[in-house]
Image (cartoon, coloured by chain):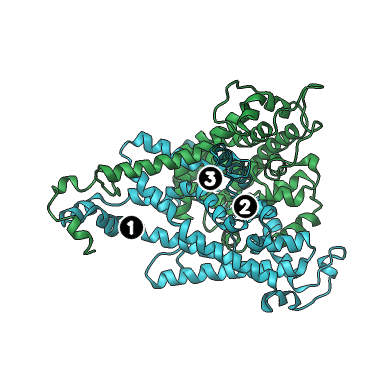
Amino acid sequence: MTTVQQPAAPAAEEGGGADIRRPPRLRPAGRRDVALFWFAIPGLTALLLFHYVPLLGNVIAFQDYQPYIGIMHSPWSGLDNFDVLFNGDDQFLRALVNTLQLTLIQVVFVFPAPILLALALNSLVSERIKKWVQNVLYLPHFLSWVVVVALFQQMLGNTGMLNLFLQAHDLGTWNIIGNPELFKSLLTSQVIWKDSGWGTILFLAALSRVDNDLYEAAAMDGASRLRQTWHVTLPALRGLVILLLILRLGDALSVGFEQILLQQTGVGLENSEVMDTYVYNHGLLGGDWGVSAAVGLVKGLVGVVLVLGANKVAHLFGEEGVYTS
Amino acid sequence: MTTLSPTHPVRRRPPRRAYSAIPGETPGTSPWRALKSLILLICVVLVLLPFLAIISTSLADTAQVTKAGGYVLWPDNPGFSAYSALLSGGLVAKAMFVSVGITVVGTALSLLSSISLAYGLSRPGSFGHKPILMLLLMSLLFVPGVIPSYLMVKQLGLINSYWSLILPTMINAFNVIVLRSFFMGIPKELIDSARIDGASELSILTRIVLPLSKASVAVIGLFYAVTYWNAFFNALLYINDAAKWPMQMVLRTYVVNNAALSGGQVDVAAGAPLPPAQSLQAAILVLSIVPIVIVYPFLQRHMNKGVMVGAVKG
């Protein structure tokens, strides 16, 4: 304090009242701000180098890319690489169909799981038990897909726990893991096991904000429990549900890449190839760089369009959406 | 609607008991409540049972595993032979070492760069604030594909280098945004008073901003650590040399793909038999879960807060 007041005193003698309030030792605003800019540099460099430069690298989608001559010298090929998309290459179509099927299945079965779980959790009276259950249910979210897939194999594989139990009771073997028919159900159950507990966090927070008077009023009006859920609880979750659906829609073309990649060998490509694995298998393993980059590029753009579009629709319906412009 | 009314006649129950004291809770009679508790109990068992099974199997002795045909739910003579075989040298010990190293170094670098980026963006109107923030936000929307990212890492000569597992994932835009919103919540008066005392931006960051946001920095650090520990795909892409594999790659090869561990890869006393394959696999799984379980209590203490801030202000 004293250091501020001492230089301020002569200023008051010379200039007048206004100068007293401005601390004279403060560095000029411009230099302060440049200092802040330097702080951003390391992170910004990483972002540019590993995010934006690769984004530019997508130009190989328009090239006949040859790894040994590089991006700079590879010949341009116009839209040749996009032929796969427009003319409906069988393998590409298969990947697209599988992806959309999985997205649909997951929106129907995976999406409501955390909501139901949150409603059940919310009715637990004991705070201690509730916390404990939450902590158990959140844990799988932090495991890697490799761990989750390995755990599922140990439990449900042909020599896993479940089948050991079945064999011990002469019930035969239930082929789950390597079965192409069950593959999509398996993927869905893995996603539910891993993430539905974690998904309850946002819903529980939204539920805790519901005004209890609303339930009281509904009960006064004679609403049954089911109708209280329907008319009070679920409307309270609506904004959040719409927001999460928009985000999910933006990811409509990416379903569980690591998860599927890990389990693809056992079940064959027919039922398991999705867009992301198509890009990986054709580009990095098959050396078909240009085509894979083209597919990846279109996939990314469609995702952006879907998010922006869904957000727009949400605005039209008077919801908040992901962002407001 | 109409079908519901007859079963729930109005005024049958006194209204005082028809709503719950818990906000947002759908009140229920005891059968409802019991059903919900039962569902939760089943969920908890479904989550915990696999852990119990692999921990028991990793500890069980050869005789019991052979008798059970594979997995056991409770070890009769628990022992650590599988773990000592894996950890006293060889592939798994090396992979654990690599994974721990990547996690520690990666988390430190991620935190340094994220904190400084978040702080650099914490005062609207500073030099370059708008375009940098825009770049950060846009990176959430526009994601470069696998192919260009791979080519970039290859171009930089990072294939088979541990840096390829750290640098590309060093900055997570979402984490930076969460940190930034914490930093912006710190009262401006505090920062101004430090500046009047002649503090540089660096000492404002280290002496005022960071001590005030310890908890959130800790959560973000843990999130980064979990991401580094769990990273599998980058290792698959960039690390071809099996001697440099992190734990997740070992797990994938020897447990998911079921490749056999031979004597050269695990260390047992000369002439002694290998522990049963099931126990070794289970032990590898346990080893790759243990670090997560260790940090989990710290993580869950703060995670509600971190997630909410990201959700509300993100």
Residue for point 24% across, 43% down: B21
Q: Considering only order in the chain, which callout, 3 or 1, is on the residue closer to the N terminus? A: 3
Residue for point 34% across, 36% down: A127
A91, above or below B112, in the image: below
- Residue beneath label 3, please? A141
Q: In the rendered image of this protein, which colour is used for chain B?
A: green
Label count reads: 3
Q: Secondary structure at mark 2?
A: helix
* Identity, as a three-letter code, of the amino acid under mark 1: Leu
Q: Which chain is cyan?
A: A
Q: Nearer the viewer, residue B307 or B217?
A: B307
Q: Are marks 1 and 2 in contact (CB under 8 Å)?
A: no
Looking at the picture, how far across and down is residue B66, in whole percent? 65, 29
Q: Chain of mark 2?
A: A
* Identity, as a three-letter code, of the amino acid under mark 3: His
Q: Secondary structure at mark 3?
A: helix
Q: Chain of mark 3?
A: A
The quadrant in which residue B57 appears is top right
- Residue beneath label 1, please? A234
Q: Is residue A240 left or right of residue B72?
A: left
Q: Are marks 1 and 3 in contact (CB under 8 Å)?
A: no
Say yes or no: labels 3 and 2 on the same chain. Answer: yes
Q: Are marks 3 and 2 in contact (CB under 8 Å)?
A: no
